[in-house]
Amino acid sequence: MKISVELTLTPLHDDYEPSIIHFIKKLRASNLKVLENPLSTQVYGEYDEVMHLLTKEIKEAFELMERGLLYLKIVKSDRHDYEPHF
C-alpha cells in the first residue's frame, strides 16, 4: 500500500536548525521519494518502508534535541505528483 506522509519537525530550543537539517538529510539518504518546502517535508512510498524509516529517524531526531514537536499527516495514496486542477 502506497502512502504519503507530511512531517513538520519543530525543536523547542535555540539553535534548532542543525536538528532539522540532520533529520532531513537522513530522510534524503533513504531510497524513498522525499520532497521539501519551507514549511514541511513529504515522504512517499510503500507503507512498511516509510513507517520503518520514520520510526527510526524520528526516534533519533528526538534523542538529539532537548524538546520538540513533530506534526505528522498520513494519506493512503502516493500524492507526490499532485497538481491542482483549478
Image: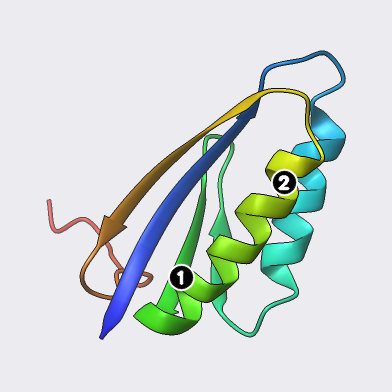
Q: Position of residue 76 (x, y in %)?
A: 20, 69
Question: Looking at this view, is 58 or 16 the one in front?
Answer: 58
Residue 4 in sight in this render: yes
Task: Name which residue type carries label 2.
Answer: Ala
Q: Which residue is mark 2?
A: 61
Residue 46 in sight in this render: no
Q: Position of residue 53 (x, y in %)?
A: 58, 71
Residue drawn at the location 41% of the way across and 82% of the way down = 48
Residue drawn at the location 38% of the way across and 70% of the way down = 80
Image position of 42 with respect to 31: above or below: above
Question: For residue 15, which quarter of the picture?
Answer: top right
The dot on residue 51 is: 1
Question: Looking at this view, is 82 or 2 the one in front?
Answer: 2
User: What is the crowding at mark 1: few (fewer than 14 residues within 10 Å), some, or many (at least 20)?
Assistant: some
Image position of 60 with respect to 44: above or below: above
Q: Is residue 33 left or right of residue 65?
A: left
Image position of 3 with respect to 2: above or below: above
